[in-house]
Amino acid sequence: MPFFSYILHSSSTDKYYVGQSEDPFRRLTEHNFGKFHNSTTSGKPWEIKAIFEISGGRGDALKIESFIKKQKSRKLIEKLVDPQFIPSGSLAQLVRVPYVREELQKPQNLMI
């Protein structure tokens, strides 16, 4: 099963969150309705801004997540959520999942 890096945005705090998962839609639900994610509790509701398929396994997804977080760069994250931006260098293995915005319009993907 492929792994994904995802970027969430909170309109209430205007902050981004970067994570990785096999199922980013399940993770979105957990961030919004779960009780065990201290780093995202204050930003509810979160929405997915970008999902990238990682060419390797979980280890590669963790490395990408860590790399993005270590940059501490809002500009980088805003580039990543821009559909026109093409990742390069250390992020070249990211493959944008283009159907994200259309899929988010379907309520069955956000089951509670």
Image (cartoon, grey):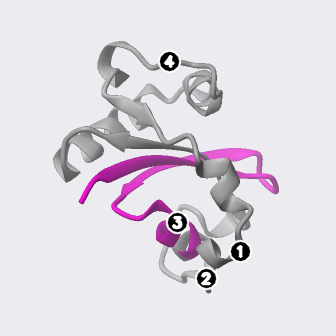
Is 70 displayed left or right of 18 in the figure? left
Q: Earlier in the sequence, mark 2 or mark 4?
A: 4
Q: Which residue is mark 3?
A: 25
Q: Is residue 8 visible?
A: no
Q: Work out how far the residue at label 2 is from the one at label 1, CA to CA, in angstroms.
A: 7 Å
Residue beneath the point at 60% across and 50% down: 100
- Residue 86 numbered tag: 4
Of pointers 3 and 4, the one earlier in the residue sequence: 3
The disc, 1 or 4, on the residue closer to the chain's N-terminal end is 4
Numbered disc 3: secondary structure: helix
Q: Magenta includes 22?
A: yes
Rendered position, 6 above or below 112: above
- Calculate the distance from the C-alpha at mark 1 to the C-alpha at mark 3: 11 Å
- Quote the CA–CA distance across marks 2 and 4: 31 Å
User: Which residue is label 2 attached to?
Assistant: 111
Instruction: Please say if 76 is above or below 40.
Output: above
